[in-house]
Image: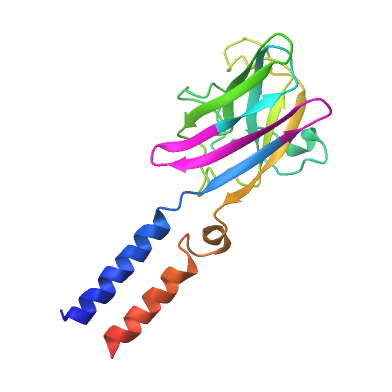
Amino acid sequence: MSRSHLLWLTLFGVIVNQAVAQNRVAVAHLVSQNISGSIVFTETSNGLQVTGAITGLPAGNYGFHVHELGDTSTCDASGAHFNPEVTNHGGREHNVRHVGDLGNVVFVGNNTAVATVNFLDTIITLRGRNNILGRTLVLHEQEDDLGQGGHETSLTTGNAGARVACGVIGIRYPAEPWNSATTSLPSLVIYALSAMFVYLSV
């Protein structure tokens, strides 16, 4: 292989590595009359890191799920829990769960309680079959029993009650990889690959 060929391959490798290293980030803004908060979903090598804070509910545990649709005309319009595998409801760390089962958020404090969210989930994703982009994040009025409460709705909703706030999960960063229907790599990589093949065929 000539030096020029090796240079092209090295350059292409660098560009690909930089593109793949761009972790996707999504965000959902929970809004209702009294509740507000922002939750960020960040790709890591180990799963999605879920972070943020929510205010507006008394101290306690409240069900927290990704629902299948992105319609927030009302929170009920967001459909059922995101459950492509058609399994029973469970806790976030259970072997059997809906993809959208994120357990409970915990509000702490006497006067103005705050739920600080910070956990890693290995099931939800921002690409592929378990992609939560465009779906709805929902906060419920009661504690999720994680499928173990024995209630008639425990294995479907965790008996978490009504939906008190919701928000569509949307793109936060970066824009370019999300825009291609055929690849997750930026268009710069496609251009470099095409140019390399033309050069090497001469």
Quarter assignment of residue 87 = top right
In terms of depth relative to the viewer, which is nearer, 196 or 97? Answer: 196
How many callouts does the rendering have?
Answer: 0
Q: Which residues are magenta?
A: 30-50
Quarter assignment of residue 61 = top right
- The answer to whether 162 is drawn above or below residue 2 in the figure is above
Give the overall secondary structure of the magenta segment. strand
Residue 155 in view here: no
- The answer to whether 175 is drawn above or below residue 194 in the figure is above
Q: Residue 46, how many percent across, how many down?
A: 39, 37
Give the image's coloring scheme: rainbow
Quarter assignment of residue 65 = top right
| Residue 36 lies in the magenta stretch | yes
In terms of depth relative to the viewer, which is nearer, 36 or 132? Answer: 36
Q: Residue 157, how many percent across, how many down?
A: 66, 23
In the figure, is residue 131 to the left or right of 59? left
At 59% from the left and 23% from the top, the residue drawn is 116
At 28% from the left and 76% from the top, the residue drawn is 8
| Residue 192 lies in the magenta stretch | no
At 26% from the left and 69% from the top, the residue drawn is 10
In the figure, is residue 33 to the left or right of 12? right
Q: Residue 171, how many percent across, how many down?
A: 61, 50
Q: Residue 194, how many percent across, how many down?
A: 39, 79
At 69% from the left and 11% from the top, the residue drawn is 59
